[in-house]
Amino acid sequence: MIDYRQSGVDVEEGYRAVDNYKTSAKRTMIPGVLNGLGSFAGLFEMPKGYKEPVIVSGTDGVGTKLDIAFQMKKYDTVGIDCVAMCVNDILCHGAKPLFFLDYLACGKLDAGIAGDMVKGVADGCLQANSALMGGETAEMPGFYDAGKYDIAGFSVGVVEKSEIIDGKNISEGDVLVGLASSGVHSNGFSLVRKLVPNVMDDFNGKPIGETLLTPTKIYVKPILALLEKIRINGMVHITGGGFYENIPRMYPTGGVHGDATGDRFVSVIKKGSWPVLPIFDELVRRGANPDRMYHTYNMGLGFIIAVNKKDAKTAIDFLNGQGFPAYEVGRVALGREDVVFE
């Protein structure tokens, strides 16, 4: 006769992990939370003041960046990445993140490692002013290799229906303002791992793995604050697919219809208008195709907004004042190629 522990699932270790989670989640409680971790579901009260509230949701994971964390034995930043990938996405529609839930899976649970990962989730939630409402930890022996974890999550936010940002207000001549990234963020790591087989290689005086683990920036607070000052016509989170895949998603589907030339809204990006981070030059030095970098990575810009020309300086000055370096990186034009560099 065998019991659950002998089959590979340590329930007691699970209890210890949950205790760690509760400590982390408690730091993120905000008005609207009606219960804590431990219930079968999280309860959140819709904020007052909305006439036509629209619920906005997004989900994502960290991907193979996790492998860098395993090699470095550093687990407390990938949770921030998990939150960032979700809240930055829903922010693109003007939504204020309300709460977050995570999913953690492994082959053999270690309460310390799992606790560090969820601590990172809580840190990300604090940066987004969002509550960590709960989640799931799945211990699946024989399914995941020992020492390997996966983490994913989803964010739920709210926006006034009349204030949804969907690109409909974008006009030719709008200025594109780019916000600096912190590094590679959480995309393109399948290529990174081929280019960097040894995470302990020196890079600017420290192991390159430390630079690669720099967590994704969370843009929620400065962008929501900026929305109280000016109108933002469109927003882009630069994730997988880099500039070419993500920037066109800012515009209404199909661009400009009915134009005799067949032109549509396109993004004209001025190279050299922002600093490309050294880590991207290092990836090219190690063999990454330089002609494909903007198809894969953020290249130093993690978020881009489209604003009226008259508001561009206000936006840049405000974002810089919030500690989020911002640059005028291009403009909206009419054309036939989605992204044009000049």
Image (cartoon, rainbow, N blue to C red):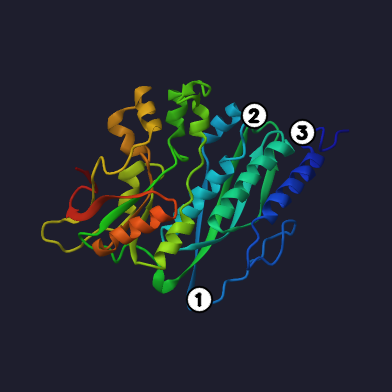
Give the residue drawn at x 68%, y 45%.
Answer: 137
- Give the numbered dot on residue 224: none
Q: Is residue 41 left or right of residue 299?
A: right
Q: Which residue is mark 3?
A: 8
Q: CA distance from mark 1 to mark 3?
A: 49 Å
* Residues packed near mark 2 inside 10 Å, few (<14), some (14 to 19) or many (20 plus): few
Q: Among all residues in the image, which is located at the extreme left?
A: 260
Which corner quadrant of the image does residue 11 belong to? top right
**Residue 266 seen:** no
Amino acid type of the residue tagged 3 in the rendering = Gly
Mark identifier at residue 50 = 1
Query: Which of the pair 269/110 is nearer the observer?
Result: 269
Residue 300 in view here: yes
Question: Considering only order in the chain, which callout, 3 or 1, is on the residue closer to the N terminus?
Answer: 3
Q: Hey, which quadrant is residue 16 in on the image?
A: top right
CA gap, disc 1 and disc 2: 47 Å
Measuring 38% from the left and 27% from the top, which residue is drawn there?
Answer: 283
Compared to residue 146, the image places residue 113 above or below, namely below
Residue 240 location (% of width, % of height)? 41, 42
Q: Is residue 310 above or below residue 140?
A: below
- Disc 3 on helix, strand or loop? loop
Q: Is residue 301 left or right of residue 216?
A: left
The residue under the point 30% across, 44% down is 244
- Where is residue 34, by image quadrant? bottom right
Residue 57, position as x, y percentages in the image: 51, 59
Q: Which mark is residue 145?
A: 2
Judged from this view, the residue extending furthest toward the right is: 1
